[in-house]
């Protein structure tokens, strides 16, 4: 028999558990910590610290009665003298699930001044409670049942109190762990000299046309994370979040202008409409080596390249259904084999019920094998939805995807590609 709830207080056990998990973050190798995204690391360490509350079955799954003896005071002898009496020992076996430690630590609210004992078999996840019943006279089944139910009832009450403490602990894990992950990655990246951004001097044109409202500011690539698991971390060129948003703003402004002036896209096909967007992008951005920072590659792509790497891909597609939309996502992933890169999928819609198409597109992204989670909530979900995708070969590689919707009049837009 083991005495329960005697190893200390549950709050201290939970604090020690969290500290142990946090120390694991500090011990994680520098390459791995930099290579993996904040969200993935937070998810892993929250799972490590998470406590599974204990649940005890409602009824015994087994039990039995055995003969035995017990020493009791001798009422007719001198003080301290005992006599041995025959008894029946009744045991009931209860199945339980959850963290076994919760049977050994005292919750913030606890049954007081009661000693609880049980045999715990962690392999079979059963809880055994024994009680003693006098063997004198006939055995009363109702009294026996009340005896072992009283024993298990006290344990249940402590377990229920512990469950409340555990629930409070679990709900605070992410807010405790996330800032530490962010700080750890920031410190490590600082050691890699984050201020020394890699050279891809993308600049706003001084002669950029005014119809597209966009603040003019300097743009340069920053470091992002390496892509290969079990390989040393290496800085790679990438657009920063601000630069990415600048490009998306240009695309959104162009879409809105085309929607408000349907004659601009009347009778134009996918490639011609794409070129409209390309003109606006290259009218706003330029690189040192080329006037056209955003270039075509094949029929429908808008690319920003650094050497042989794509750090931004925009893909334009007419909506023709979920299947072809999923293929467009596959195409984007094929262009972006590096983690933490950025992409845009521009969807041209000619159907009257554009809201239904947007819902279908959202469902198609979420159903895609590479979908990891939703991105930041957009201010205009009828125009833009954000997602985070993982590369099919390595879900730790993350691609930020903005899906933009351009709704054209069915009677005035271009013909089907």
Image (cartoon, rainbow, N blue to C red):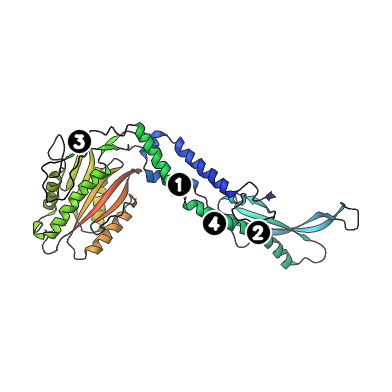
Q: Nearer the viewer, residue 320 or 108?
A: 108
Mark 1 or 4, nearer chain start: 4
Q: Is residue 216 left or right of residue 396?
A: left
For marks 3 and 4, give the CA distance.
Answer: 55 Å
- Is there any visible trace of residue 232 in the rendered image? no
Q: Secondary structure at mark 2?
A: helix
Give me the C-alpha separation between circle 2 and circle 4: 16 Å
Pinpoint residue 141: horizontal percent, then vertical percent. Answer: 73, 66
**Residue assigned mark 3:** 201
Q: Disc 4 marks which residue?
A: 164
Q: Residue furthest right?
A: 77
Q: Along the polypeptide, which appears first: circle 3 or circle 4?
A: 4
**Circles 2, 1 touching at the beta carbon (< 8 Å):** no
Q: Please say if the residues under marks 2 and 4 sit with CB atoms less than 8 Å apart.
A: no
Indicate whether 354 appears above or below 196.
below
Query: Where does label 1 land, which residue?
Result: 176
Observer-nearest of 361 and 138: 361
Q: Is residue 160 visible?
A: yes
| Image x and y of residue 24, in percent | 47, 38
Per the image, label 4 sits on a secondary structure element best described as helix
């Amino acid at each position: 028999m083991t005495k329960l709830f005697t190893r200390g207080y549950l709050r201290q056990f939970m604090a020690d558990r969290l500290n142990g998990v946090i120390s694991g973050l500090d011990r994680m190798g520098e390459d791995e910590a930099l290579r993996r995204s904040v969200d993935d690391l937070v998810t892993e360490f929250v799972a490590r610290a998470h406590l599974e509350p204990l649940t005890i079955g409602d009824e015994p799954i087994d039990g039995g009665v055995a003969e035995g003896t017990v020493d009791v005071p001798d009422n007719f002898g001198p003080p301290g003298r005992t006599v041995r009496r025959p008894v029946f020992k009744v045991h009931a076996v209860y199945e339980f699930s959850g963290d076994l430690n919760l049977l050994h630590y005292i919750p913030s609210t606890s049954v007081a001044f009661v000693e609880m004992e049980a045999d715990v078999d962690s392999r079979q996840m059963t809880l055994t409670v024994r009680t003693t019943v006098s063997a004198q006279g006939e055995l009363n089944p109702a009294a026996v049942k009340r005896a072992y139910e009283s024993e298990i009832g006290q344990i249940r009450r402590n377990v229920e109190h512990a469950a409340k403490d555990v629930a409070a602990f679990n709900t605070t894990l992410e807010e405790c762990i996330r800032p530490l992950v962010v700080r750890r990655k920031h410190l490590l990246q600082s050691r890699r000299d984050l201020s020394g951004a890699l050279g891809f001097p993308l600049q706003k044109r001084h002669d950029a046309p005014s119809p597209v409202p966009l603040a003019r500011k300097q743009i340069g690539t920053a470091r992002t994370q390496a892509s290969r698991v079990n390989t040393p971390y290496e800085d790679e060129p990438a657009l920063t979040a601000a630069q990415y948003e600048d490009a998306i703003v240009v695309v959104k402004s162009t879409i809105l202008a085309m929607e408000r002036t349907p004659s601009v896209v009347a009778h134009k096909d996918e490639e011609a409409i794409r070129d409209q967007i390309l003109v606006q992008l290259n009218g706003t951005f330029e690189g040192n080596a080329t006037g056209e920072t955003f270039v075509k590659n094949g029929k429908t792509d808008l690319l920003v390249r650094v050497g042989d790497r794509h750090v931004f891909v925009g893909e334009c597609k007419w909506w023709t259904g979920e299947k072809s939309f999923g293929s467009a996502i596959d195409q984007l992933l094929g262009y972006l084999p590096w983690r933490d890169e950025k992409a845009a999928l521009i969807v041209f819609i000619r159907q009257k019920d554009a809201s239904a198409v947007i819902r279908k597109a959202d469902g198609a992204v979420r159903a895609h094998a590479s979908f990891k989670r939703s991105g930041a909530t957009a201010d205009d979900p009828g125009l833009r939805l954000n997602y985070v995708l993982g590369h099919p070969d390595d879900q730790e590689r993350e691609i930020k995807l903005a899906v933009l919707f351009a709704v054209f009049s069915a009677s005035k837009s271009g013909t089907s590609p």
